[in-house]
Image (cartoon, helix red, strand yellow):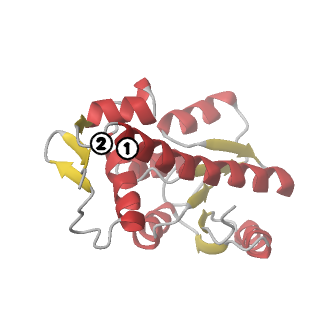
Amino acid sequence: MNNSATIIVIEDEAQIRRFLRTTLASEGYQVIEAETGKRGLTEAATRKPDLIILDLGLPDMDGVEVVKELRAWSSVPVIILSARSQESDKISALDAGADDYLVKPFGVGELLARIRVALRHVSSTEYRLLTVLVKHAGKVLTHHFLLKEVWGPNYVERAHYLRIYMGILRHKLEKDPARPRFLLTEVGVGYRLAVL
């Protein structure tokens, strides 16, 4: 398990932020704090976190809006941590693109377990994407095909997921990620794993 993961906590209550920072740091996580939605989005764009913990009741914007904005360019796992316990709140947050939802007050053990699950899910997505590319090495695979194979039929319109994960794989596997030799982009169509 990658406990050196970077987590952004977007929460306006200083006491809860402090508690989360102490708890997560004691588990080995790197913690970045943001007290507003706008600040959280800026941190997410610049720090490239492994996970985001997000409160819904922020002073400048609703947490659901933060998730929607984030999902326009990132597939980073988002765990909602909110005092809102209505089913409708949970549904709107999850439909907007959040990965999990935990109601305050929450148990530390449960939060840590959910973080571990979310982080495990990310590396399994990278692995699934690479597996599909290897299985069809040399062939051009469309965005639609890859999204359906890796994420499922409900995700075929989310091409940005593919861009993000291909970027992650290139950083891990290519000598120069900006000029890939193996994980090639077929502009406007999809991707191909080159057979050298």
Q: Is residue 19 left or right of residue 156?
A: right
Residue at 24 percent of width and 45 percent of height: 192
Label 2: element kind: loop
Give coordinates of residue 38: x percent, y percent. 44, 64
Looking at the image, residue 183 lies above or below residue 150: below
The image shows a total of numbered marks equal to: 2
**Residue 4 figure quarter:** bottom right
Q: Is residue 106 visible?
A: no
Residue at the left extreme of this rendering: 187
Q: Which mark is residue 137?
A: 2
C-alpha span from label 2 to label 1 = 5 Å
Front-lying residue, 92 or 12: 92
Looking at the image, residue 170 lies above or below residue 132: below
Please state, as top left, top right, bottom left or bottom right, where the C terminus lies in the image.
bottom left
The amino acid at mark 1 is Val
Give coordinates of residue 99: x percent, y percent. 58, 42
Give coordinates of residue 17: x percent, y percent. 70, 69
Residue at the top extreme of this rendering: 153
Q: Is residue 162 left or right of residue 97?
A: left
CB-based contact (under 8 Å), mark 2 and mark 1: yes
Looking at the image, residue 173 lies above or below residue 186: below
Please state, as top left, top right, bottom left or bottom right, where the N terminus lies in the image.
bottom right
Give coordinates of residue 175: x percent, y percent. 32, 73
Mark 1 highlights which residue?
134
Residue at 49 percent of width and 40 percent of height: 97
Q: Residues within 10 Å of mark 1 (few under 14, many from 20)?
A: some
Residue at 78 percent of width and 49 percent of height: 104
The amino acid at mark 2 is Ala
